[in-house]
Image (tube, helix red, strand yellow):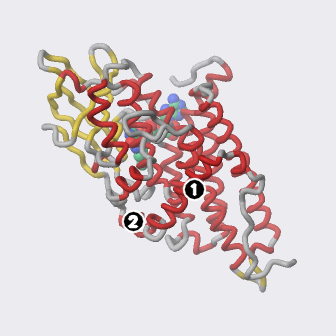
Amino acid sequence: MPPSATSQPANIDLLRIDDQLTSEERLVRDTVRSYTADRVMPHIADWFEAGTLPRELVPELGKLGLLGMHLTGYGCAGMGAVAYGVTCREMEAADSGLRSLVSVQGSLSMYPIWRYGSEAQKEEWLPRMAAGEAIGCFGLTEPDHGSDPGSMKTYAKPNDKGWVLSGTKMWITNGPIADVAVVWADTPDGIRGFLVPRGTRGFTAQTIHKKMSLRASLTAELHFDEVKLPADAVLPGVTGLKGPLSCLSEARFGIVWGALGAARACLESALDYACTREQFGKPIGGFQLTQSKLAWMLADLTRAQLLALHLGRLKEAGKVTPEQVSLGKMANVRTAIDIARQARTILGANGITLEYPVIRHENNLESVLTYEGTEEIHALAVGQALTGLSAYR
Ligand SMILES: Cc1cc2nc3c(=O)[nH]c(=O)nc-3n(C[C@H](O)[C@H](O)[C@H](O)COP(=O)(O)OP(=O)(O)OC[C@H]3O[C@@H](n4cnc5c(N)ncnc54)[C@H](O)[C@@H]3O)c2cc1C
């Protein structure tokens, strides 16, 4: 049948990869999809334009059991890695900013407390964070130290009462609204993590404005001006860069999946547009060049989805390595941004307006390409795994 203005785009899960999900994982998928369809999609373009994401979404996400969902105990849902990945995918199909909020809360703020915190720290923060009553942020990057966090200047000096923390952290997601900051600082013993509650004297968070990407996400610069912290503010369970890097590995796994949600949304939008937009007397989806674009977008998305699912099952088996996550983050974000860019061309001029989701996703993915390890840094991690040679410096 020739394409017509009313032809319906096919289900883009052509290989039926989602059939590999368990019934519980499919339930999570459908729950998140229906939540974002109801609560996020009607407003997301406006939130993106205004540069905001309403805080009241956070307790709603808590009620759905999505905050720290891959952790156990303390009110966390204790779900598997693939269920977490599917959640990230469906969140990011709405917006990377929403997925970032969930990633930072669960993987970068709750995870370090859950893995390295004292019992008292866990009891104090995790149940409230799982419920979305308290929001966390993760302060590693500094204005002059991004890809090389080991050279950080933020310093925590021990004294007889506890610690004195000084320094600046940059680009901190959730920073403007966080109730607790997990801050990584150098100490005489090496890098340690500190829990700094909002309102602590000398701690300020300044919202970063004028972002052209991840606008529906709140980002801050955190300042610590000789902040006095009690001795028990430190996470007792880890010293060294492996602390923050292990958290990042958790969050990057979410990105491996999340980026595919953005890519899928772009492909769906382009497909829908291609089947309805007419030029030269027929739908543009009826032109071979458009179909070739769509076919390659689907092929790339399908491969990337298989990679994500495989990594997820490896993670559930306790076998995943940081290099494997680097490979997944590097490959899948590149795939997603390529799909977004191709989708943009199919929408023509409409591809640059917030009336359609594509430019929003494309711009968001520019941040996703950079944060939690740039594409180049992950290439170096994979390169080192391949050659045994470190090329970082
Ligand atoms: C929207 C957003 C949210 C963020 N949220 C957080 C957060 O919540 N918490 C947090 O701690 N950080 C956060 N970040 C910071 C992010 O992790 C850093 O931006 C990232 O690590 C890169 O650091 P940089 O921007 O300083 O770039 P740089 O490190 O200065 O890198 C600039 C360029 O040089 C390249 N480069 C650097 N070193 C090498 C090398 N050895 N070999 C080859 N190329 C190299 C990089 O790949 C990149 O292309 C966020 C960033 C953004 C944009």
Q: Position of residue 2 (x, y in %)?
A: 85, 78
> What is the crowding at mark 1: few (fewer than 14 residues within 10 Å), some, or many (at least 20)?
many
Pick out the residue farthest to the right.
Answer: 1
Can I make out residue 326 in this image? yes
Q: CA distance from mark 1 to mark 2?
A: 17 Å
Q: Position of residue 356 (x, y in %)?
A: 55, 70
Pick out the residue farthest to the bottom.
Answer: 281
The residue located at (64%, 53%) in the rendering is 338
Q: Amino acid at mark 2?
A: Trp
Number of numbered callouts drawn: 2
SS type, badge 1: helix
Say if 141 sits above or below 358 in the image.
above
- Horizontal relation, residue 201 to residue 325: left or right: left
* Residue tagged 2: 47
- Horizontal relation, residue 181 to residue 318: left or right: left
Q: Position of residue 285 (x, y in %)?
A: 76, 72
Pick out the residue farthest to the top.
Answer: 189
The residue located at (51%, 57%) in the rendering is 363
Ligand 1 sits in which quadrant? top left
Identify which residue, 229 or 296, lies in the foreground.
229
Q: Is mark 1 within 8 Å of ligand 1?
A: no
The residue located at (27%, 19%) in the rendering is 187
Identify which residue, 291 or 312, lies in the foreground.
312
SS type, badge 2: helix
Say if 247 sits above or below 336 in the image.
above
* Residue tagged 1: 262
Q: Amino acid at mark 1?
A: Ala
Q: Mark 1 or 2 closer to N-term?
A: 2
Disc 1 vs disc 2: Cβ atoms closer than 8 Å? no
